[in-house]
Amino acid sequence: MYTQGLLEAIPKAVSALEDSERMARFQARIDAEEKIEPKDWMPDAYRQTLIRQISQHAHSEIVGMLPEGNWISRAPSLLRKSILIAKVQDEGGHGAYLYSAAETLGIARSELIDQLLSGRAKYSSIFNYPTPSWADIAAIGWLVDGAAIMNQIPLCRCSYGPYARAMVRVCKEESFHQRQGYHAMLSLARGTPAQQRMAQDALNRWWWPALMMFGPPDTASQHTAVSVRWKIKRFTNDELRQKFVDFTVPQAQFLGLTLPDAQLQQAADGHYQIGPLDWSEFNAVLKGNGPCNAERIAERRAAHADGAWVRAAAIAHAAKRAARAVA
Amino acid sequence: MTSPQDWPLYEVFVRAKRGLDHKHVGSLHAADAAMAIEHARDLYTRRQEGVSLWVVKSSDIVASDPDDAQALFDPAEDKIYRHPTFYDIPKDVETL
Ligand SMILES: [Fe+2]
Ligand SMILES: [Fe+2]
């Protein structure tokens, strides 16, 4: 909100002293669990970190529509199709909430879209994996949305007000995403041997990439310390990953499926210990060498280009109507 | 930066049910107000979150400056006599 006002309000040149006073007040506010709002003074690094994180998040929601959208026309029943359309529409909505939140920091929507389409912006690597079978749609809802929820719930308490409020809205909708995925997985797991194989195959392919959604291990993560101090991040990557594993292993057992990790075991303290993650694969996908990186961006570019005449026509129509209203 | 070809930004307010105020829920881009209402319906009321919508161009909102917050709001701080709890009334007085 108040994007325009904010653009003017960005301070020109503040003295170092004034800056350190403001910085102290800013940090005190965060320490007191008060929210930072768009027109408040904030250090430039805070602003830039949030723009990067919120826009990457928004891009992920938008690109995330593609692997699932791929199955709308082939969903196995009318009900599953209705559910999938609703879910994909939600993801588009999540992207829109988040772009709006990013815009309150003084960056234009068109610039954010440009960053995505030009390949300068990152989005979650998970969406660079293909969805060759229906079971992939079930596995995405269960695991990918499940991991997203784990990441997103702490963001509802993020120090930046518009981001926190957007995340409350997102989290309310995510629970449906995960449950419909698990429900679809359950149908397959209780189905014919061929359906069970399909479910197992999808789990085999999505398990490790889902675990990597939490980001690099704490020992290798660059952003954590300052993000924790600014309460943009509340838990480390490894903490969230462990929580996800502990929740998900029993769910897989209930399905009668096997997690593709021979080293997986329950420790004496109840937590499940996983085998080593293959970070070279993660980094390769992140660098653009995943199975679908090029396809995803090409699809977004085409959608944007195909919609150009609609955007222009709508502006022209609005201008014409406004002119008529004056006359 | 924004160009004239970009759809302007609108703030969206939703009335959750009759009898409640419209509450700010977020923003969206639209070519005009009519489209903003349509987009607001799709974006903010997919699960019956509202019975009425307001949209207003973000550039039309005038907001107070956070730097003026002290000057604007602190004067109310020491006027505790504006609250009913300020007044100690003997217990014997009922219905007050
Ligand atoms: Fe989402
Ligand atoms: Fe989702």
Image: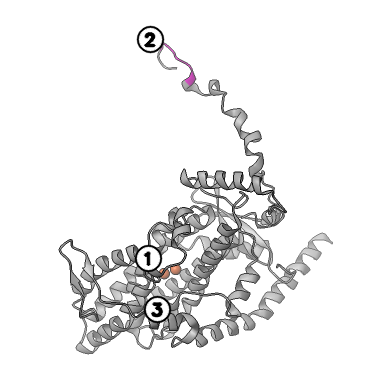
Q: What is the spatial separation of the Cα atoms under label 1 and label 2, in whole angstroms?
A: 61 Å
Q: Is residue B42 visible?
A: no
What sort of colour scheme is used for the picture? one colour
The chain to which mark 3 is attached is: A
Determine the residue positioned at 66% across, 39% down: B68
Residue, far left: A268
Q: Is residue B94 visible?
A: yes
Q: Amino acid at mark 2?
A: Asp
Is residue B35 positioned above or below B24 on the image? Answer: below
Q: Position of residue A323 (x, y in %)?
A: 81, 65
Determine the residue positioned at 18% across, 77% down: A256
Quarter of the image with the C terminus of chain A in it:
bottom right
The chain to which mark 2 is attached is: B
Q: Are marks 3 and 2 on the same chain?
A: no
The answer to if B90 sits in the magenta stretch is yes
Q: Which residues are magenta?
A: B86-93
- Disc 3 or 1, which lies upstream in sequence? 3
| Label 1: few (<14), some (14–19) or many (≥20) C-alpha neighbours in 10 Å | many
Q: Position of residue B11 (x, y in %)?
A: 62, 56
The answer to if A56 sits in the magenta stretch is no
Image position of A164 (left or right of B61): left
| Label 3: few (<14), some (14–19) or many (≥20) C-alpha neighbours in 10 Å | some
Q: Name the residue tied to disc 2.
A: B92
Q: Are marks 3 and 1 on the same chain?
A: yes
Image position of A102 (left or right of A217): right
Q: Name the residue tied to disc 1.
A: A237
| Label 2: few (<14), some (14–19) or many (≥20) C-alpha neighbours in 10 Å | few
Q: Amino acid at mark 3?
A: Lys
Q: Name the residue tied to disc 3.
A: A81
Label 2, ligand 1: CB separation under 8 Å: no
Q: Amino acid at mark 1?
A: Asn
Determine the residue positioned at 50% across, 60% down: B45
